[in-house]
Amino acid sequence: MSTLVWPPIAADELIREEDASLARELQWLLGSLQETLQSLKSGLEECAELLAPKEPGSTLVLSSMRSENLKGFITRVGTRIVKGDVHLRLPSLPPPKGQTSYKLSLSTSPTAPTIALEQLTTTRTLINACLDVVDATRWTGDSKNANFISGQIRLLHDNIQEAKTALKGWTQEQKPWHEEHVDVNAFSPPLPANVSFHLSISEAAVLLHVRTLEPAHPHTGTSTPLALAAGASSPSYSGLSLRERLSTALGGGRLAFHDEAHEIFMYEGQEVRVRDKVRVESQDPSLMAVMAKLGALERNVALSKRALDIVMGKETDEG
């Protein structure tokens, strides 16, 4: 299909008319983006409200699947965990005499250190940055300057994308469990030295890993693994020494079966192995709502960015 101008006009005049039409389209788009920014601000404020530190917070039930290894709850207020009780039944963590489980309780003392979820702190910071970008774009910048508006829209898109990624989890900036330690004094009584308590966010859910630890090379007095120190004639591809395998065969402690059973980690200055590991995921309705809203905002900003790039004649990454 072709478009004809009738009566015909000169080529140079046609170019001038096309440029004038494109300029009018650009000004119309810049004006409509002001309404889009107001709508985006409302959505961002809803996200900020869901992450605000408001009492009584969100109480999340913790329960290991198909086992009694871990039962309990935690309470999240904003980006912090302020309350929680966890009952553990792990072979390597015997309960106190007269008890059926080992209890970990967050301290309620006002002077106790708090447990902050860094991913939520990052998300909240980025959302606040987005709100600042929207206000700067609407009130302090030149709303008719296409290059300025384009730069602000791109910044807004990047921040929203990063905030959503922080809620999804497992980013390169996220520290592994053995490098991110919870203060033992956040618990009452303090967390045992051989227990790692690690909280993170994955797909807008709160993820708890509890691990019991042991020295990587016990009883040798050196850095030599126990299997070699015992004079084993061949390496142990199972990750267990001859002594450990004999002990298990004769009714000793059970083997550790999890994805980290044969790995060695540097934890608080020493090499350790993970004896027992339990993973519990608890869906947080507020975080799920934030992630859904950020996804919708990201799509809206991406459409605005693409439309502005097309009218400005810029190349876009989208097809």
Image (cartoon, rainbow, N blue to C red):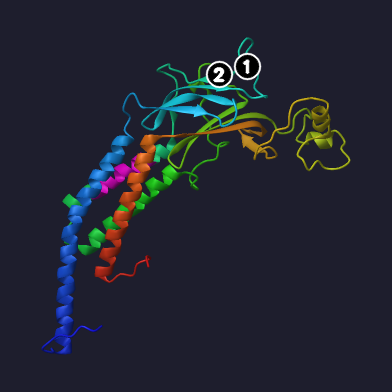
Residue 293 on the magenta span: no
Residue 198 in the image: above or below residue 314: above
Residue 222: x and y in percent read: 77, 32
Quarter that holds the N terminus: bottom left
Q: Earlier in the sequence, mark 1 or mark 2?
A: 1
The amino acid at mark 1 is Pro
Residue 155 in view in this figure: no
Residue at label 2?
A: 103
Q: Is residue 175 visible?
A: yes
Q: Are marks 1 and 2 in contact (CB under 8 Å)?
A: yes
Residue 286 falls in which quadrant of the image?
Answer: top left
Amino acid beneath label 2 = Lys
User: In the picture provided, is 272 more to the left or to the right than 199?
Assistant: right
Crowding at dot 2, Cα within 10 Å, few <14 / some 14-19 / many 20+, comes out as some
| Left or right: 295 in relation to 255 | left
Q: Is residue 28 above or below residue 297?
A: below
Q: Which mark is residue 150?
A: none
Q: Main secondary structure of the magenta part?
A: helix
Give the magenta-colored segment's residue range.
123-134
Q: Is residue 220 left or right of residue 164?
A: right
Q: Position of residue 26 (x, y in %)?
A: 19, 67
The residue lying at 33 percent from left, 29 percent from top is 53
Q: Quadrant of residue 152?
A: bottom left
Give the total number of marks visible in the rendering.
2
Calculate the distance from the C-alpha at mark 1 to the C-alpha at mark 2: 8 Å
Helix, strand, or loop for circle 2?
strand
Residue at 29% x, 59% y: name it.
303
Mark 1 lies on residue? 95
Say above or below: 2 vs 251: below
